Image: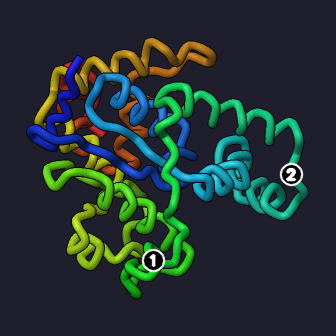
Amino acid sequence: MGVDHPLSGSGLTLAVLDTNVILSPRLSDVLFDLHGAGLYFPRWTADIESEFLDHWAEVVLAKSKADRKTMRLAAADPVHLQLATRRLKCFRAAVGVEYEVFGYQRKSVMDRVPEKVDSGDKHLVAAALVLRDYCEPCDQIYLISDNTKHLAVKEVAALGIEVVKPGKFVDRLFAVAPDRVAAALERTITDLKNPPYTIGQLLGALQLHGASRVVSHFEKVWNLPSS
């Protein structure tokens, strides 16, 4: 079966997913269902997984700022770590062994990361550079992050890598493959049964991450009040 990635014409679409993207439960559900619909290939690294495990509890379980601070300062709870690891295993199973980017820590790669990229985020751009190096010119390489201000968007674009916020990425996919995006969102809703998650809640999560075009469309389709 051939690959049909609509953002890339005859090529592939590969996207490095920043930690802040996969930490968001509903956003990551949607992004992996979009992958399941055959719209792109998600990729990440050992460093991203390490950050995910470090911050999962404070992002997903904390009920307040005080809770987040407490969890951040406390020793890792084995139960929380087990839950976070289970979530990572779901991501890996959805993508397969090809999810992981290797070689991004090599000096020859890191030296090419623009100086304007924040020091704590250089590993993200380096991972995207590895993909750029090994892919064909017709392939599209994205770095998806909610923290684009630290990623020197213009300078990184000059290297053939597009840095975008997750909501904008979802909107772009919808613009070129609306039926497939709709099917992916319907799968997300169907799968979220324990606890159940409403269509309105899902669209609210997407609105939070900037998928304004998708949200506006499906509010009308599903007869929901506008955000």
Residue plotted at (17% across, 21% down)? 179
In this picture, is 211 found above or below 221? Answer: below
Q: Which mark is residue 108?
A: 1
Between circles 2 and 1, the one closer to the viewer is: 1
Q: Quadrant of residue 158?
A: bottom left
Q: Is residue 132 left or right of residue 79?
A: left
Q: Which of the labelled discs sits on residue 132, or is there none?
A: none
Local packing at callout 1 (Cα closer than 10 Å; few below 14, some 14-19, many 20+) is few
Percent from the top left, x then y, of residue 134? Answer: 32, 54
Q: Amino acid at mark 2?
A: Ala
Who is closer to the viewer here, 180 or 99? 99
Q: Nearer the viewer, residue 208 or 118?
A: 118
Which residue is nearer to you in this view: 142 or 63?
Answer: 142
* Relative horizontal placement of residue 219, taking residue 30 as reference (left or right): left
Q: Residues within 10 Å of mark 2 (few under 14, many from 20)?
A: some
How has the structure been colored for display? rainbow
In this rendering, is residue 216 above or below 199?
below
Local SS, label 2: loop
The numbered dot on residue 76 is 2
Q: Position of residue 227 (x, y in %)?
A: 30, 40
Please say if 189 is above or below 171.
Answer: above
Q: Residue at x 42, y 21 (%)?
A: 188
